[in-house]
C-alpha cells in the first residue's frame, strides 16, 4: 500500500534534506524545527515523529540528530522532479 503524504509531511522531508545539505550528514531536530513558524512547531514535531516511525527519517544512535533514509530520499527526489501539483485534471 502506498502511503499518502500530507503537504506538511512533504515539507518536513524537504526541510530535512535542505538543512542537512547532503545525504550522510545528521542534523539536530531543533535546526529542522526552526525552519517552521513557531505556532506550527508542535504539529511539526508530531508529523516528524510519525516520519521517523514510518522509516523515512532515521535517528543517530547518540544524541538528537536525524537524517533521511533511502526511503525518505526517494520521496524527496520524487518531490523535486515532480514539482508541486496545483490542480488535477
Image (spheres, rainbow, N blue to C red):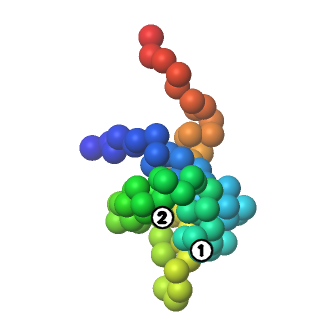
For the point 35% across and 40% down, which residue is it? Answer: 4
- Residue that carries the numbered disc 1 in the rendered image: 28
| Quarter of the view holding residue 23 | bottom right
Please give left or right for residue 81 compared with residue 70 in the image: right
Residue farthest along the bottom direction in this orientation: 62
Q: Under tag 1, what secondary structure?
A: strand
Crowd tier of the residue under label 2, counting other residues whose Cα lies within 10 Å: few below 14, some 14–19, many 20 or above:
many
- Residue that carries the numbered disc 2 in the rendered image: 57
- Residue 13: x and y in percent read 53, 53
- Residue 65: x and y in percent read 56, 77
Please give left or right for residue 77 compared with residue 69 in the image: right
| Quarter of the view holding residue 78 | top right
For the point 67% across and 64% down, which residue is it? Answer: 20
Q: Which quarter of the figure is the N terminus placed in? A: top left
The image shows residue 79, relative to residue 32, as above or below, that is: above
Q: Closer to us: mark 2 or mark 1?
A: 1
- Residue 8: x and y in percent read 46, 46
Amino acid at each position: 500500500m502506498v502511503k499518502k503524504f500530507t503537504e506538511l509531511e512533504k515539507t518536513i522531508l524537504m526541510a530535512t534534506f535542505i538543512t542537512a545539505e547532503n545525504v550522510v550528514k545528521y542534523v539536530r531536530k531543533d535546526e529542522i524545527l526552526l525552519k517552521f513558524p513557531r505556532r506550527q512547531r508542535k504539529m511539526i514535531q508530531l508529523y516528524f515523529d510519525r516520519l521517523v516511525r514510518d522509516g523515512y527519517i532515521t535517528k543517530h544512535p547518540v544524541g538528537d540528530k536525524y537524517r533521511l533514509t533511502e526511503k525518505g530520499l526517494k520521496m524527496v527526489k520524487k518531490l523535486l522532479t515532480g514539482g508541486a501539483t496545483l490542480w488535477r485534471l
